[in-house]
Every structure is written in structure tokens, then in C-alpha cells.
Amino acid sequence: MMSDAFVRADAVRLQDFSLLCEQQARREHYPLCAEVQANVPIYEGHRLRTSDRQAVLNELHRVFSQGPGVLVVRQGFDDPAVIDRHSAVFEAIFATEAEAGVAADHFAKAGSNGRIWNALQKAALCSPASFVEYYANPLLGLIAEAWLGPDFQVTAQVNVVRPGGQAQQPHRDYHLGFQTEEVVQRYPLPLHVLSQYLTLQGAVAHTDMPLASGPTQLLPFSQQYPLGYLAWRRPDFIDYFQQHAVQLPLAKGDLLFFNPALFHAAGSNHTADLHRMANLLQISSAFGKPMETLDRQRMMLALYPHLLQQATDHLLDAESLAAVVACCADGYAFPTNLDTDPPLHGLAPQTDQQLMVQALQERWPYDTFAERVARQSAKRRA
């Protein structure tokens, strides 16, 4: 018997949801992880960096899809000084925006949080050197590729939860998580499932996050419920979340990544003096629309001189260089104007990532690179 593609909110059943959330993640299910805590696989950054890449991709994808939907990487950044230097960049941006009267967070009571929207572009323009050092971490791209495949699009928002900041309501994230129930009902159920495959949610801990500071509340396995985009606002589901959600303390430099369909919520900060800071990464599939608009070509031009110097002095290996380029430049060839931007070799035109890598490998001077970026942009216009 075929099920209906279009479903309404009255099809939601807490019993079906709770059966999924009662599953148990075990250490033997995820051989590359160090341990499982509260149904969350805990990985060590060094082991992910040195293990067989294909094995890592497959295991992490299984965690996000068929598994609990969330993982932690201890020492995702193994040098805390890198985190501290990039935190200083964020503090400078906060100061600039406060002086300009920029209103920050849309998701919390005024004054309880600090938020930098489009932190990726702002950090690239504010401090290219710190941006390159920070995003040269290949682990970020490795985890993103495990869920999204290549040519993903990185965006980032910084969140600071101050002492006394209150917990969020549990929710799902972008795409359908940012739509009303009425809109969600208009999409067939296969697109509810598809939505979770279009983004990956991540966070880099920029401070230690003991439980009292309110690290993210998580409900493992909740991403597996197909009707979750219709369910998360319901009082019975909120009550279930509050009774069964888990939290894990994080140390500065740890990474948290989860499927966007996982029920989750920021926790309350009960400390007296700890300002909990995280760089929130919302990474989009090449086939989806990111939530934020970035001027990626402006970022490329701002970062290129520093990247060129690093490449010339052999201070970045090829993997780290590719990691930075993947964060700033578009790796997908479409949409474009196929009259003026025909395929280069095969079926797709040259991407901005390919152009930037070529420029760095061939050591183009800045003016040559800027001219080629402008030319490529012009070719794509309708």
C-alpha cells in the first residue's frame, strides 16, 4: 500500500517519534570513535586526520543519517592559540557593530546573546591572516563532505550566550525548519527528508563549555522521524525533548556537528561569568541555497595576497590550502550564462575554486588574479 506524499500535522504521532529516539548508539557501531557518551559518538581529531579517508567519510555519513545524527570531535583544533586569535577577530567585529548600532540576534531576548551574522565574510575582510590560519583546518571540510559531498558552501554565524541567557525552544533547522507549519504541509514528504541532506550544522567551541554554561541540548536519533518538521512546535514533543535531551561539555577547540533535522536547542547559561562563544557553521550542499548571501569574490580578493604568500613560502600544504579555498570560493559551476560561460573541459564551466587554485599554483600576481575574477564574473551574467 502506497503512503500519501502530502501529509498534515494531524498525522504526527509522539509514540512513533519516541520509538526512534529510544535507540542506542554503541561504540562497536562506530569503530573510529573513541567512545559514546549519552548516545553521542565522540571522536578524536588526530584519529580522523590520520585514518583512511574513505572509511571516515562512510562512518560519519552513517552517524548523521542512520545513527544518532550528532557527533563531537575532541581537539578538532589542536592549537588553542588559533581559536584565541580568531576570537579576537570576532571581538573586533562585535565592537565595530556595537558602535554602528547593529542589532544582533533574532532568536533570543535582547541583550542575552551576541550574534555576528555573515561572520565568514566579515572575518575574511577583517583579518585575512587569521581566516587562513583558522579555516586551513581540513577537518571542517572532511566532516562537511561526509554529509554533503564536494563543492559545499560554508556560511558562519558567531553566537555568544552571556550569563543568564535562557535556553531556546527545541527546533529543527534550515531549510524546512525555518518555514511555518502551513508552508511545510505544502511540500511532499520526500522533500521533508531531502531537506536534511541539504545542510549540515556545526559549531566550533571558542570557550570551554561546562554543562552549567548551557551547551547545546540534543535529542539523538530524532532526525530519523520523517514528520519532524511538522512536529517540533507541538507541546507534547517539546515536553518529550525536555525530558530526554542530552548535553555534553565541550572544551575550547572541540567541534560539534549534527544533522539539521535533529531536535536541538541552545541551553541556559547558569554561570556567573562565562560568556559561551561558538562559531556556528551552517554548511550547504552545492545543490541547495545557503541561508546567507556572501560576496565570495570579494572574499577571494581579500584573502588571495596572504594565501599567495603562504603558498610561495610553502607554509601551507596542499590539503590546508584547499581547505581555505573551499571555505571562501564557490566550488559549483552553476547557475551561469552558458552562452558566454561555456564548459571548459567536459560539461561544466570553470568554478571560482578551480580558478583560485590555478592562480595559487601558477603564482599569479594579484592584479592578474583580480582581472581573471572580474572576467569570470562578467561571463556569468545574463
Image (tube, grey):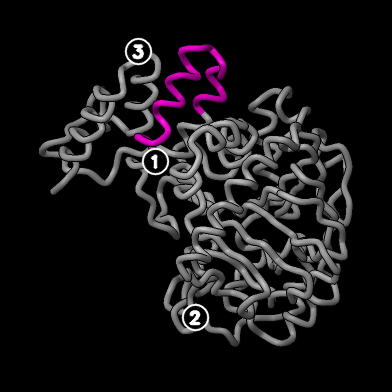
> Whole-percent x and y of residue 28?
87, 39
Residue 315 is a magenta residue: yes
Which residue is drawn at the image coordinates 60% and 59% (left, top)? 260
Nearer to the camera, 236 or 49: 49
Q: Is residue 242 visible?
A: yes
State which quadrant residue 259 falls in. Answer: bottom right
Nearer to the camera, 68 or 70: 70
Q: Nearer the viewer, mark 2 or mark 1?
A: 1
How far is the residue under mark 2 from the one under mark 1? 34 Å
How far is the residue under mark 2 from the one under mark 3? 50 Å
Disc 2 marks which residue?
A: 180
Q: Nearer the viewer, mark 1 or mark 3?
A: 1
Amino acid type shown at disc 2: Thr
State which quadrant residue 74 falls in. Answer: top right
Q: Are marks 1 and 3 in contact (CB under 8 Å)?
A: no
Amino acid type shown at disc 1: Met
Disc 1 marks which residue?
A: 299
Q: Earlier in the sequence, mark 2 or mark 3?
A: 2
Which residue is drawn at the image coordinates 70% and 42% (left, top)? 84
Disc 3 marks which residue?
A: 362
Left or right of residue 381, residue 322 in this image = right
Nearer to the camera, 264 or 28: 264
Name the element at disc 3. Answer: loop
| Residue 21 badge | none
Q: Earlier in the sequence, mark 2 or mark 1?
A: 2
Left or right of residue 200, residue 23 in this image = right
Name the element at disc 2. Answer: loop
Crowding at label 1, few (<14), some or many (≥20) Cα neighbours within 10 Å? many
Question: What span is colored magenta in the figure?
Answer: 300-322
> Whole-percent x and y of residue 202?
64, 51
How far is the residue under mark 1 from the one under mark 3? 20 Å
Crowding at label 2, few (<14), some or many (≥20) Cα neighbours within 10 Å? few
